[in-house]
Structure formats: C-alpha cells, structure tokens
Image (cartoon, grey):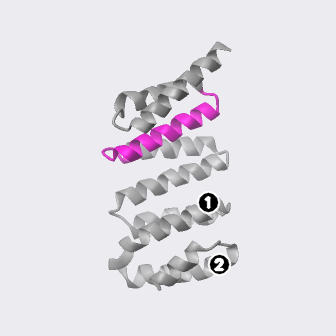
Amino acid sequence: LYEALSEKISRKITYNDIPEIEKRYAFLMENFPAERPLLTVNTRILIDKLIDRGMFDKALDYIGRLKGYFPNHMSTLAWGELRKGDIFWKLKDFEKAEKVYSEVFETFQGYSIYEVLALNRLADLYLEQRKLDEAEKTYRKIIAGYSDQREFAFEASIRLKFIENIRKK
C-alpha cells in the first residue's frame, strides 16, 4: 500500500484522484502508526502537488492533519505551517499569511532554518505589499541574527539594496 500510495502521488493529481489517495492514506495512517514517519515525505509531496494544482482547500486540509499524524516531527509541522502561509499569500490574503509566518517564527524557536525561512517569507511579503519599513526591519533581523544562514543573509542584503533604490526614486 505504501508503494501504491507513493506511485499514485508521484503522478499528476486531479480532483478525481483525491478519494483514492485519501482512502489509501487514511488506511496507512490508522493501521500502521509505527510507519507514519515514512509517510512524511509522501505527505509533503502530496501537499505540494495539491498547491501546484490550485487545490488549496485540500492542501489546507492535509496541513491541518499534520499535527495529528506527526505530533513530534517538528520539521514537518514547521514546513506545513510555512506552506499554509504560502497558500494564503497566493490567495492574496496577506493578513493571514503574515500571521502564519509570524507564528512559525515564534513557535519554532530553536529550529533556525524554519525561523529564517519564516522571516524571509515575511520580509518578502512586506516588500511585495510595499511595506518598506517592515521589510527593511525584517531583512536586518535576518542579517543580524542568522549570519550562519549565509544564503538568507546574502539575499536579505540584496533586498535591502533594492529597498534603498526604491526609496531614492
């Protein structure tokens, strides 16, 4: 069943595929709890595919299930919350996206990659909305607090120059 689920998820997903995927997924989750960690990758792939296909309601449903399915898998929980924020951003619900990214930053303290991912998305969200002061403050926070995450610190410094150029115009 695990292989069948993996194979089904690896293909293009349509709304017609969802009932079969859900049936297999639920069976595995309910009957093989010790195997749940093996399903984290499949769950992430499924959620990403649902988002890519614009099936945001289904993706949010699966993200909502992550805490029940993987209560101690902090990276999966953090990842799911980031993806939730991404969905709200795509839906142009900037207020909800901002709230989710801020909550990820606060909730997953000690998991620096998720802290910096949340801050980076938050800063980019502010920049897209032309909230330049908030964006600048958040990018500076990335540079000051996450210099070990070089890629993000470098990206933040580039974005700060971009903000500076916008303000000059």
User: x, y percentage for residue 120?
Assistant: 49, 38
* Residue assigned mark 2: 17
**Mark 1: few, some, or many residues within 10 Å (few <14, many ≥20)?**
many
Q: Are marks 1 and 2 in contact (CB under 8 Å)?
A: no
User: x, y percentage for residue 60?
Assistant: 57, 61
Determine which quarter of the picture holds residue 49. bottom right
**Mark 2: few, some, or many residues within 10 Å (few <14, many ≥20)?**
few
75, 6: nearer the viewer? 6
Residue at left offset 43%, top offset 78%: 29
* Residue assigned mark 1: 51
User: In terms of secondary structure, where does tag 1 sit?
Assistant: helix
Whichever of callouts 1 and 2 sits on the residue coming sooner in the sequence is 2
In the image, 127: left or right of 30? Answer: right
23, 148: nearer the viewer? 148
Residue segment shown in magenta: 107-131
User: x, y percentage for residue 75?
Assistant: 38, 56
Farthest residue in the top direction? 168
